Image: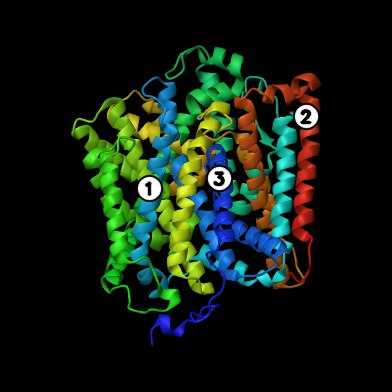
Amino acid sequence: MDNKEQFKPFIPAEKIVPEMTAFSIIMGAILAVIFGAANAYLGLRVGMTVSASIPAAVISMGVIRVILHRDSILENNFVQTVGSAGESLAAGAIFTLPAMFLWAKDGLMEKPNLVEIMIICLIGGLLGVFFMVPLRNALIVKEHGTLPYPEGQACAEVLLAGEEGGDSASVVFAGLGISAAFKFVIDGLGLVPSEINTPSTGLGSFKGQIGTQIYPAVFSVGYICGPKISSYMFCGGVISWMMLIPLIVMFGSDAVLYPGTAPIGEMFAQGGVSAIWGSYIRYIGAGALATGGIISLIKSLPMIVTTFRDSMKALAGGQGGSELRTDKNISMKVVVICLAVLIVLTGVLPQVPVGIGGAVLIAIFGFFFAAVSSRMVGIVGSSNNPVSGMAIATLLFSTIILKATGAEGAAGMKAAIAIGTVICIVAAIAGDTSQDLKTGYLVGATPIKQQYGEIIGTIVSAIAIGGVLYLLDAAWGFGSEQLGAPQATLMKMIVEGVMGGKLPWSLVIVGVVLACVVEILGIPVLPFAIGVYLPVQLNACIMIGGLVRLYFDRKKYASEQEQTRVTNRGVLYCSGMIAGEGLVGIVLAILAVIGVSDKINMAGVLNLSAGAGNIASAVVFAVMILLVFKFTLGGRKNA
């Protein structure tokens, strides 16, 4: 008897319950846009995104009970399937596409228009879904007892625990509303500064700076990631802002060093540590990030080769002939036709500037990395899936081929980023689809309906993501201190380097060496490298979130069930805070673009001194943290 015959899902195959309904489609589409926009904003700020599956599931459970007065676990599962696609597509897009915006600012090319962004993202997302369809039987069904799919199982557990009522959903909504209010007070009204800082003038000749942001979403990233990852990021930030910047200012005071255009001392006098960060530290961080991505890919190569080989072997075994509801996938005939059409369109559409050769590269890399991503998330989870490493490898290989075939300059650079974007989205969506299909397998969903749900989520998100990118770029600009866009800057650097563009290689190599040393010491490179790249104030806020999570993890509880309850509530509340700040960030971007933001901002009127501003910010931050304790420890004890 095989795994498929032994396993019995929560909803039997013979039972028909509401699943792909009008409400679940609309609700899922709305959440896809919300979490896609929120994760785009978050990823461009801190270089990391968070899974939307569980928050989407609990929001769905709460709304379906309140509005429809019914409880269908499969309807909730369909909502999270559609909703989580937005987060995955956004992650793939923000890792690469902002590079084109940065080149546009340099005068090298025009920005990609909304139609170009939509088509590139749509092709990547649909390829990710269709590449995953034939792998479902091989990875989800046949290897049910082998591949755990940690996020997929966690989401299934949340859905199965839906008998708790609306309490979990209320925690998410509370986090969303409270975070939105804090974000509007801090950045909208400007009533308190967004950072608590030591003086940037330093102590005597020491020109470092330390401080913390007070944003709820940044704090929440630290809480969700936990103390270890947070500490790695914080250490990277401390090395940049308390060691590298002071050394650059001290030794290069009168020097004009590329890419800076003025003496370092003058730059520091006019712009403080932020000026040094923007001109020098970001390149060191980019070198460390690139090295971290390559190292993670190299370390994963044995697993990548094994997983791809095993996936192909299992796939060769066929899709199975069962006619059960829980075994129905999109037919292979439809999948093959759709894949062929998408690959042809990739080669001929002017909005996807890759040509026939680029389309062939996308087909090869896309299928390979879709298979690898789908299986690897089943082993190590989405958080440890080396998508950035896959994107780096694709960019390096594609850029070398493009240059060798004569596609140089702006056209070659744009083609390389387009290929990288499609592959990044393919890997992200394939991983998300496999996690969602695992959740569906456990609860008894209909696979073909979930696959339709992924397609719906991809289409909706692809339409929306271009507008989000344009808004954020117009409001603050990619590569700025507000939106560092670390991965996109890294991809830009790689393409420029291969194409022969001018880069401060000495700074990049410093980052490479730093990453190698960190790897030798046994410290995870990618979070450390992100910390080197991003401002220390952001890393410190993440660290504070990690410390709060450490308190909850080590706190003594009456039972293991109580500890699980507190942990889940904390993660849900912080997921809500991320969504709330992301949404208000989009609203504030709209207000900035139409010229309203300056009129409502009171920072200039209040004109707080540095000391008074630090005190006011500390009070607001303390209140925010106290509310985390209240909503994490509160609620029904039997929830």
Percent position of residue 576, x then y: 66, 51
Q: CA distance from mark 3 to mark 1?
A: 18 Å
Displayed quadrant of residue 399: top left
The residue carrying pointer 1 sits among few (fewer than 14), some (14 to 19) or many (20 or more) residues within 10 Å by Cα, namely many
Look at the picture and state if 213 lies above or below 156.
Answer: above
* Circle nearer the N terminus (3, 2): 3
Q: How is the image coloured?
A: rainbow
| Quadrant of the drawing holding the C terminus | bottom right
Residue 387 seen in this snapshot: yes
Look at the picture and state if 251 lies above or below 119.
Answer: above
Displayed quadrant of residue 594: top right
Location of mark 1 (residue): 124
Look at the picture and state if 203 lies above or below 372.
Answer: above
At horizontal 54% and vertical 50% (from top left) the residue drawn is 32
| Tag 1: amino acid | Gly
Can you tell which mark lies on residue 39?
3
Q: Secondary structure at mark 3?
A: helix
Q: Foreground residue, 272 or 522?
A: 272
At horizontal 54% and vertical 73% (from top left) the residue drawn is 443
The residue carrying pointer 3 sits among few (fewer than 14), some (14 to 19) or many (20 or more) residues within 10 Å by Cα, namely many
Can you tell which mark lies on residue 191?
2
Percent position of residue 579, x then y: 63, 47
Percent position of residue 473, x then y: 52, 29
Q: Secondary structure at mark 2?
A: loop
| Tag 2: amino acid | Leu
At horizontal 23% and vertical 31% (from top left) the residue drawn is 407
Residue 566 seen in this snapshot: no
| Quadrant of the drawing holding the N terminus | bottom left
Q: Foreground residue, 110 or 544?
A: 110
Q: Which of pointers 2 and 1 indicates the residue nearer the eye?
A: 1
